[in-house]
Amino acid sequence: MSRLSTFIGMLLLTGCTSDPVMIRTQHTFVVMPADSMFVCNRVEIPPSNNLTDIQVARFIANLYQQNQQCKNSLEAIRTFLEDAKKSMVTD
């Protein structure tokens, strides 16, 4: 019981302070890029038995193209998020 009375006494005393209490709110925003920016296609790996040199070359070229497309998508997402961050007002 004494703990409860001590707590209530401290609670009442804190209400007697002369300094104003500043209450500050913080807003959190979630910025989500468009789904069209998330473009990273999967590359199917051909069966490795009996591949011709042309098939290997086409596979490597396809890997390169898909890597470039995915890289461009990630750069677009980064730019989008950086622009969104700049447009947010900070205190």
Image (cartoon, grey):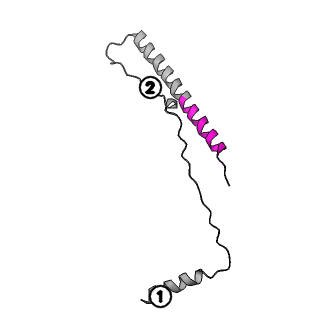
Callout 1 amino acid: Ser
Q: How many marks?
A: 2
Q: Residues within 10 Å of mark 2 (few under 14, many from 20)?
A: few
Nearest the eye: 56 or 91: 91
Which quadrant would residue 51 be assigned to in this image?
top left
Nearest the eye: 64 or 78: 78
What segment carries the magenta color?
73-91
Residue 65 located within the stretch drawn in magenta: no
Outermost residue, bottom side: 2
Residue at image x 38%, y 10%?
A: 52
Q: Is residue 72 left or right of residue 5?
A: right
Nearest the eye: 15 or 46: 15
Q: Is residue 4 left or right of residue 82?
A: left
Query: Which x, y percent locates residue 12?
Result: 55, 83
Badge 2 marks a residue whose secondary structure is: loop
Q: Which residue is mark 2?
A: 41
Which SS does the magenta portion mostly show? helix
Query: Which x, y percent locates residue 31?
Result: 55, 43
Residue at image x 46%, y 18%?
A: 62
Residue at image x 53%, y 24%?
A: 68
Residue 75 located within the stretch drawn in magenta: yes
Query: Which x, y percent locates residue 72?
Result: 56, 27
Nearest the eye: 70 or 15: 15
Badge 1 marks a residue whose secondary structure is: helix
Q: Residues within 10 Å of mark 1 (few under 14, many from 20)?
A: few
Q: Which residue is mark 1?
A: 5
Residue at image x 48%, y 16%?
A: 61
State which mark lies toward you, 1 or 2. 1
Which quadrant would residue 10 be assigned to in this image?
bottom right
Callout 2 amino acid: Asn
- Placement of the C terminus among the 4 image quadrants: bottom right
